[in-house]
Image (tube, rainbow, N blue to C red):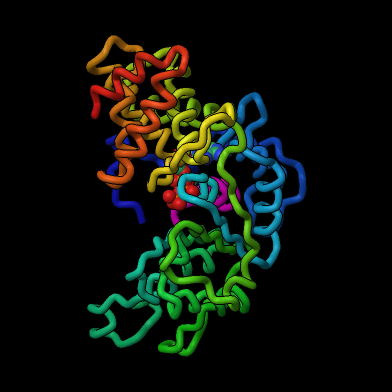
Amino acid sequence: MTITTDTQPVLRPHAEQLYAHELAALIATDDLPRPPGWRMSPQAVVTYLLGDGDQISPKYIGPRRLMEVAVATLATDRALLLLGVPGTAKTWVSEHLAAAISGDSTLLIQGTAGTPEEAIRYGWNYARLLAEGPSPQAVVPSPMMRAMQTGAIARVEELTRVPSDVQDTLITILSEKVLPVPELGNEVQAIKGFNVIATANDRDRGVNELSSALRRRFNTVVLPVPSTVDEEVDIVARRVESLGAALELPAVPDSIAEIRRAVTVFRELREGITGDGRTKLKSPSGTLSTAEAISVMTSGMALAAHFGDGVVRAADVAAGIRGAVVRDPVSDAVIWREYLETVVRERDGWQDFYRAAREAE
Ligand SMILES: Nc1ncnc2c1ncn2[C@@H]1O[C@H](COP(=O)(O)OP(=O)(O)OP(=O)(O)O)[C@@H](O)[C@H]1O
Ligand SMILES: [Mg+2]
């Protein structure tokens, strides 16, 4: 059910809405075999994710093989677990996979410490339950149940945050492909095309581990951090451009130099060593992910467009970068200051950034 009016533009369209033309073009020309219940062939799904250098834009930038493994998994009876450190596009890839395979990325369960079993199974419309007793009409299906009934992909975000006993609800669903409804004495049998994509963050320590019974039902694909500066710059540049367009920010030309700088700072601090391998650095407590670089640059563009001269400059990003680095006001601030004095200050062409960063202190 959608409860939005169709006269007002939505803030964030779903992948299947935003890329409807690409999906339609792929479906129209796809003559390869499709797994039952799929809207397109596995090859076409991978093309949708990685782009074709022409009409189909790249969504995921990284190793093709990983996407092939992910897509191939979904064509089997095993579910897919996307694992990785924060900001490695787990959620993003999961949304696009569901959009391409089922045409619907909205069958989503957000995992939290408070996720109840009903969020994965079903709930009850209590007014009807009291009036009529348990009946199929009184059942409120979960996104999982709807995915099973329609043969679509269900997504579970942050699976390891879900309490272990609730996680285990998934075992029957994944191994038997049924969801029992004991109150009605029946069950929902999954239609072909149904599968599950879960994401989990391997940085979130202290949360619930996946039980080994559940883990065996998933194929795991680990999404890596971008392997080179150039690749990460490319990811940030593309995402910043499309976010800027979606937010209808005035066009900001030539931000690539500042993007490269932000990415360089993030990578050096993350890896604990300068790009030339000469200086060891202390790493701050934050993750300094690609996703954070994207948000620093998007804010920088908004500053430049609305309050600057229309070009992203060091002053538009310095405070944002500092904000991402300094999460702990004491220890991270020391690390940042040391980085500024030993690396930024001495680096050719980085004086503007050094000054802006000092002013942002
Ligand atoms: N390799 C990549 N290719 C394309 N986009 C990427 C890549 N890595 C990161 N991004 C971008 O980073 C942003 C954040 O990604 P996303 O939210 O999917 O991360 P995540 O892995 O789910 O992180 P978290 O663990 O914090 O939930 C997205 O806008 C995505 O486009
Ligand atoms: Mg995520």
- Looking at the image, residue 119 sits to the left or right of residue 218; the answer is left
Q: Residue at x 24, y 84 (%)?
A: 131
Q: Position of residue 212 (x, y in %)?
A: 59, 76
Provide the major secondary structure of the magenta segment: helix
Quadrant where the C terminus lies? Answer: top left
Q: Which residues are magenta?
A: 95-107
Tell me if I can see residue 271 in this picture. Answer: yes
Q: Position of residue 333 (x, y in %)?
A: 30, 39
**As displayed, is residue 162 above or below residue 299?**
below
Label tally: 0
Residue 79 quadrant: bottom right
Tell me if I can see residue 189 in this picture. Answer: no
Residue 301 quadrant: top left
Q: Position of residue 143 (x, y in %)?
A: 44, 64
Q: Residue at x 41, y 16 (%)?
A: 350
Q: Residue at x 42, y 34 (%)?
A: 293
Q: Position of residue 59 (x, y in %)?
A: 56, 36
Front residue (pair 166, 181)? 166
Q: Is residue 47 magenta?
A: no
Quadrant where the N terminus lies? Answer: bottom left
Most distant residue in the top direction = 309
- Looking at the image, residue 150 sits to the left or right of residue 30; the answer is left
Front residue (pair 347, 250)? 347
Q: Residue at x 38, y 48 (%)?
A: 285
Residue 359 quadrant: top left
Q: Is residue 96 magenta?
A: yes
Front residue (pair 338, 230)? 338
